[in-house]
């Protein structure tokens, strides 16, 4: 079946603009995660949704970052008033309900490469 | 918080066996995952260990010792396509996964 998809794959924006990054998880996966990944590093947790409920946003760097998943499927990560330090690869992942494994087994999307100029 | 340590690089020849160690410190521990990431690609799930012992999946095996806060990923019969970064990740709650910095494995002919 289809994997996790993200759009756009690449986004170049000017400092101060808002951007919206979209994630379409694997059908039936109730859990959805957003990560940021710097070159040469592992993914860094940003936020987590269980169905439509955002249960943890502790990894969001500041209040310019927000995320939603209104119908428990597609999610959007929004960055307002972008800054150059926001440039990174943003990845979305989803996981099925699997007792015992849960979030240990995640399926990642191809990511959105954000460049703020 | 969580901290994970794994070697930054490993080089081996085709057909060899490579072991990537991961030690962790965490305030809560549910299990240890391993992910593979090829250059330019997305991380892909390899294995998850919640209990002590060895889990084997084809050429790859993963081991966990909860008492030692230690795990490893064993890659056997190395192939060129195994050249990639490998990340260990600690599951510290129902949903939280914290990744290490990754180990770059280079397979030489």
Image: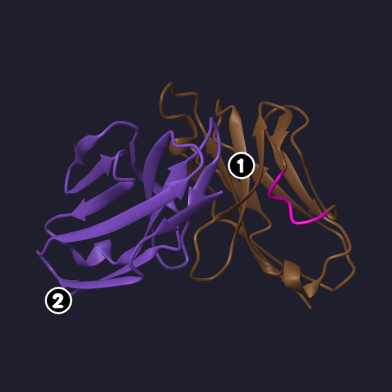
Quadrant including the N terminus of chain A? top left
| Residue A22 x, y percent position in the rendering | 71, 48
Residue at horizontal 25 percent and vertical 51 percent from the top? B73
Q: Calculate the distance from the C-alpha at mark 1 to the C-alpha at mark 2.
A: 38 Å
| Residue B42 x, y percent position in the rendering | 48, 56
Residue B63's mark?
none
Residue at horizontal 49 percent and vertical 37 percent from the top? B28
Q: Is residue B81 magenta?
A: no
Residue B109's mark?
2
| Residue A70 x, y percent position in the rendering | 78, 31
SS label for mark 1: strand
Range of residues picked out in magenta: A58-62
| Residue B39 x, y percent position in the rendering | 42, 68
State which quadrant residue B36 falls in: bottom left
SS label for mark 2: loop
For the colour brown, the matching chain is A
Badge 2 density bin: few <14, some 14–19, many ≥20, Cα 10 Å: few
Rendered shade, chain B: purple
Q: Is residue A36 above or below residue A101?
A: below
Left or right? Give the position of A78 relative to A24.
right
Determine the chain carrying the residue at label 1. A
Depth check, front residue: B50 or A70: B50
Left or right? Give the position of A88 relative to B103.
right
Residue placed under numbered mark 1 in the picture: A33
Determine the chain carrying the residue at label 2. B
The majority secondary structure of the magenta stretch comes to: loop
Residue at horizontal 88 percent and vertical 66 percent from the top? A17
Quadrant including the C terminus of chain A? bottom right
State which quadrant residue A68 falls in: top right
């Amino acid at each position: 079946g289809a994997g996790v998809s993200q759009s756009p794959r690449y986004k170049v924006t000017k400092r101060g603009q808002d951007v919206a990054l979209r994630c379409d998880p694997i059908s039936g996966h109730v859990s959805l995660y957003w990560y940021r990944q710097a070159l040469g590093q592992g993914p860094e947790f940003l936020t987590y949704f269980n169905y439509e409920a955002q249960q943890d946003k502790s990894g969001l760097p500041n209040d310019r970052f927000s995320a939603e998943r209104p119908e428990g499927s597609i999610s959007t990560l929004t960055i307002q008033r972008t800054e150059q330090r926001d440039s990174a690869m943003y990845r979305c992942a989803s996981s099925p309900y699997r007792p015992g494994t849960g979030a240990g087994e995640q399926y990642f999307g191809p990511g959105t490469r954000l460049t703020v100029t | 918080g969580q901290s994970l340590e794994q070697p930054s690089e490993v080089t081996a020849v085709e057909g060899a066996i490579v072991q990537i160690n991961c030690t962790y410190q965490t305030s809560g521990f549910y299990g240890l995952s391993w992910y593979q990431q090829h250059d330019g690609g997305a991380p892909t799930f390899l294995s998850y260990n919640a209990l002590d012992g060895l889990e084997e999946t084809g050429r790859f095996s993963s081991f966990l010792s909860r008492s030692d806060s230690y795990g490893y990923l064993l890659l056997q019969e190395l192939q060129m396509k195994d050249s990639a970064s490998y990340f260990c990740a600690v599951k510290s709650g129902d949903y939280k996964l914290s990744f290490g910095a990754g180990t770059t494995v280079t397979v030489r002919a």
